[in-house]
Each structure stands twice: as structure tokens, then as C-alpha cells.
Amino acid sequence: MTKVLLLLVSGALVNNVVLSRFLGLCSFVGVSKKKETSVGMGGAVIFTIFLATILASVVYACVLRPLGIDYLQTIVFILLIASLVQFIEMFMKKSMPSMHASLGIFLPLITTNCAVLGVALDNVQKEYNFIEGLAWGIGTAVGYAIAIVILAGIRERCEENDIPKYFQGLPIVLISSGLMAIAFTGFSGMIT
């Protein structure tokens, strides 16, 4: 039980997928302009990683490993994630059209979001059992959501302030992200 809790906290804070591993930066920077869209993207990533973790674990344990074709894991996981994202996109288009429109091109980009693939591959490479893999996936997804919502809040505050011309736009976003990464490393002393 303590290992599961450590994996949750570690995935969310200590080994934050965006701020310490630099995975999923495209949607992290692109969607974090408004808090509402950031929350939507965070939720979509949480849902995608949750389902991808379950499906990837089952496919790996029941198909790839028994057949001795675990070397195909990356290709199979990419196909699995792409299918999941298509399902999520169709669901959001039907049930939440305004959120679907606000996420725009970044919703299909979850397919190529390295964070989602990274969790599936981590679970296999670190040989987590199903529960541990699920804890790592949920922790990682929540960490992504925390980071993108915090960055959105910072970006909204930056729009209200007078920022020097050469720091406006992407430079201040990257500086803010770097400062967030430094702040998140403070959690590394809590969990070893």
C-alpha cells in the first residue's frame, strides 16, 4: 500500500512528467493560455492515461509477453493510444462541443503526447504490477494536470502585467515553466 501511495505522489510531484521529464511539452505550452482549456486538457490526459494504462497492461500481459513479441510494445501502445484518443475526441465532440472547440488541434495531439506513451512504457520497463502501474499512471496524469493548470494561471496573470517586450509570449512561458520545474524539485527531498 505504501508503494502505491509513493508512486502516486512521485508521479504527480517528484517525477512530474512535464517539469522533470519534459514529456508532453507541446500541449503543455500550447493549451495553457486559459485555465478552462487547461482543465479540459488535463482531464482528457487523465482519462487517456488511465485507460491507456489499463489497456496497455492487459495487452502486454495477455498478448505481447505470452507470444514473445514484447519488442512490438512501442508500436502496439501507439496504436492503442491513437484509438483511445479518437474515442475521446468523438465523445467530447458529441457531449462537450464547446470544450472540443476550445481544445482545437491539441486534442488529437494527445495521440502523439509522449507523456501517455511514456507511462505505458514505464510500466513495462519498471515491471510494475497492474495496481502499481495504475498508481503510476494516475499520479503522472494528475501531475500533468496540476502543471498545466498552474502554468495557465501564471500565463493569465502575466497578461495583466507589464512584461518587457522581448520577454512577451513564449519567452515568459518558458521562464515560468523553468521556475515551476525548479519549484517542483523541492518535492524530491520528500520521497527517495
Image (spheres, rainbow, N blue to C red):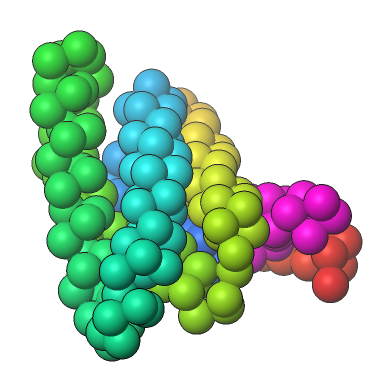
**Residue 135, percent from left and from top:** 62, 51
**Residue 156, percent from left and from top:** 44, 30
**Residue 119, percent from left and from top:** 45, 63
* Magenta span contains residue 10: yes
As rendered, which of 36 and 82 lies closer to the eye? 82
Locate residue 120 relative to residue 95 in the image: left or right.
right
Chain part drawn in magenta: 1-16
Q: Say whether residue 180 is visible.
A: no
Main SS type for the magenta part?
helix
Locate residue 145 relative to residue 49 in the image: left or right.
right
Locate residue 102 relative to residue 68 in the image: left or right.
left
Q: Say whether residue 105 is visible.
A: yes
The quarter of the displayed image where residue 104 is located: top left
- The residue located at (29%, 58%) in the rendering is 113
Residue 60 versus residue 82 in the image, above or below? below
As rendered, which of 162 and 185 lies closer to the eye? 185
- The residue located at (16%, 61%) in the rendering is 79
- The residue located at (13%, 21%) in the rendering is 93
* Magenta span contains residue 118: no
- The residue located at (25%, 49%) in the rendering is 110
